Amino acid sequence: MKKLLTTSVLAAATFGVAATAQAESLTVLSWGGAYASSQREAYYKPYTAATGTQIVEDEFNGELAKIKAQVEAGNVTIDVADLESATALQGCDEGVLEVIDWSRIPNADDFIPGSKLECGVGTITWATIVAYNTTAFSGDQPSTMADFFDLDKFPGKRGVRKSPKVMLEFALIADGVPAADVYDVMDTEEGIDRAFAKLDTIKDSIVWWESGSQPPQLLADGEVTMSAAWNGRIQSAIDGENQPFKIIWDGQNLDFDMWVIPKGTPNLDKAYDFLKFASAAKQMGTQHTYIGYGPVTNEAGTMIVDDKLAEKLPSAPVNLGNWVPHNLDYWADNFDDLNERFLAWVSQ
Amino acid sequence: MAIATDSSQPLTTADGTPLRQSLRRAERLNKLRAFGLVAPLFLFILVFFVFPIAKLASVSVDNSIVPEILTNTVEAIQDWDGTDLPPEPVWKAMAADLVEGKKNRNIAKVGKRLNFEKPGFRRLLIKSARKADKLEAPYKESLIKANKKWADPEFWRVLQRESGDYTFSYILRAVDMTYSEEGSVTMVDDKNAVYLDIFGRTLFISAQVTLTCLLLGFPIAYLLSTLPAKTGNMLMIFVLLPFWISLLVRTTAWIVLLQDQGVINSALIGIGVINEPLELIRNRVGVVVAMTHILLPFMILPLYSVMKGINPSLMRAAKSMGANPAIAFWRVYTPLTVPGIGAGGLLVFIISIGYYITPALVGGPKDIMASQLIDIQMNQQLNWNMASAIGVVLLAITLVLFAIYNRLVGIDRMKMG
């Protein structure tokens, strides 16, 4: 009886979306905005042209809850999703994602280090960077991570993501910690204190953001003069809307996005077919022409021929002077505690 | 004599059955019919109210995942006295569980659970499971060789403490408490204390909203109840109109009004009252203003229906006996509205406590309310146990307040209309 009730209640809750998944279509969950547009051009449209399968797009803010709820209710309508690497790891731990059978991805050996997870197939490299509005400062322009924390030299509000992730890394870099040592310092209590102390110096000037589309908006509206942001979103605003923004390539945090398959999708074979298609250099090598995110296979990397486009990518050598690779394991271990401390700090 | 004998005999109906029995049967039929009529409602409350709350409470203490996955270890560790490191059988059991967990691919699940108790536990279990096949007797040395963290007795003590089917860790954490290294319950470090602060703030904001609703709603309800029916009904539509507009739309409208370049600030700057925009949004002012607007009808409606029922001749009588209008209003009219104030106040207050979308949109980080904490646990951290625990604490706080209210005002004095 209890089980019956649970299933029927959950089934009722998800019934609304159950109708969208059909045999001749594949539902892909992604982030919306400029990023989804680039995926549409690089993957969805060519895939439909090649196979006749329609791609049904669904949108979210990167949270796993939606997938988890579907998997636990046994009614999975999302066939493929695009997750941050940390979330893909989390979903794998939770057992709500399919373990990837790499033998079904022909170019599996060509992926760059870090872009292959147990439950995730890499799709892009992206970076959390600091960007600023060039019209905000008349004299010197900011050029380092330390400048983001320097309110005297570069006055104005700062846009910051409402999460301890990456912001603690930024604070330590600005405080003079070498990029290579950031996560070692964060492994100590004093290191965390140090990061929060640095964040304290700009606390009163912070405007918080939660979705990736907010930072370009905050910069454009003049609500902030500098903001932490995802590099592709800023690049799209520069290229697409002629916004006077500039990205500071210093101390950025480099990460991957992953294609994942929710456990129990009725379209498992088709989902693998899509991942195979999207991992091929022919497709992956075109995405960077639509948004400033880099490919994750070597062969797709060789398809970046336009130097102007190459410079905009987080994987471009010219941008890799001082950078930090995102440490998945660190955050999987410490996020609970640090987020509690972060919330306490934010709300005081 | 004969009469006395008769009265000792039970009364019977025409067909000879005892009257009491026959009556009982008739009553039973009535009871069944009455029950049949309320059955749908009863079932509804059971399925959509009692069952979810019971489920919520059980999830908030659920720890079944640990004994489920680390079956052998949990059994073996019971006999350990907690000093130094556990004896060899426990190590052997852990090695067996790691092999099993690796095979079933669920070691990360229990790792995440234990990581909540002690950061690092997740990585320890996952890394050890990867090497599980190479573990051999003596398992103690073998495990420590695989990962030297196993030599830290703290991990074993946490495991021993959290080996049952139930745990109070989540509930404790939801009130800023935790277990110390020795296993006793203590307050968490000040730097990590977040829940009590936010519960307190949630109650405070709710009280602020209730008070402003009362101050604004009372005169409106009074006006509505004293106007002639035609005008009164007309004005009533204005009260009800926002009620029919989506909550999200109304909240967004307040953002348009209150933001730095919003309608209010532009107007004030335009007529030269201020030079710099006032900070009206992403702070407490915005939250209280928007919530008050949204919850005002919940205050006005009960007040109105109570005021409508107050006999106007009572006021006239008070005045005829020499009370001036203010005293008559304060000493005769206001006490009669208390049931309405109680109902409206309780309604607004309790709805406020669970408010989510409005503080999330117009509030700043210093206005985070309890439901936002639940959202963070549900969506970001995927810790549904912790989300349930916060829900349980919130429910407990609400029930305590309700009991206090009942003691002070009396729930039977509440009038919805």
Image: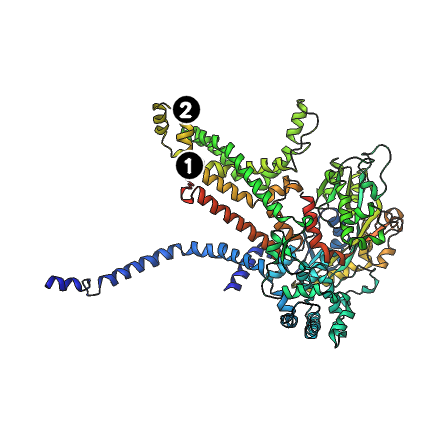
Dots 2 and 1 on the same chain:
yes
- Where B253 falls versus B107 (above or below)? above
Report crowding for label 1: few under 14, some 14 to 19, many 20 or more residues within 10 A (C-alpha): some
Q: Quadrant of the C terminus of chain B?
A: top left
Residues B167 and A76: in front is: B167
- Is A141 left, or right, of B248 in this rendering? right
Give the residue at x 45% y 29%: B223
The chain to which mark 2 is attached is: B
| Label 2 crowd bin: few (<14), some (14–19), many (20+), radius 10 Å | few
For residue B189, say whether it is visible. yes
Label 2 residue SS: helix
Query: From the image, which quarter does the N terminus of chain B lie in?
Result: bottom left
CA distance separating discs 2 and 1: 22 Å
Query: Cβ–Cβ below 8 Å for labels 2 and 1?
Result: no
Q: How far from the left and from the top, in percent, is residue A237?
A: 78, 42
Amino acid type, callout 1: Ser
Q: Which chain is disc 1 placed on?
A: B
Which residue does the numbered mark 1 point to in the structure image? Answer: B305
Examine the rendered structure and indicate whether residue B291 appears above or below residue B82.
above
Residue depth check, mark 2 versus mark 1: number of the one nearer the observer: 2
Q: Which residue is mark 2?
A: B325
Q: Quadrant of residue A197?
A: top right
Query: Which scheme is used to colour this image of the protein?
Result: rainbow
Q: Is residue A313 above or below residue B288?
A: below
The front one of A186 and A245 is: A186
Q: How many marks?
A: 2
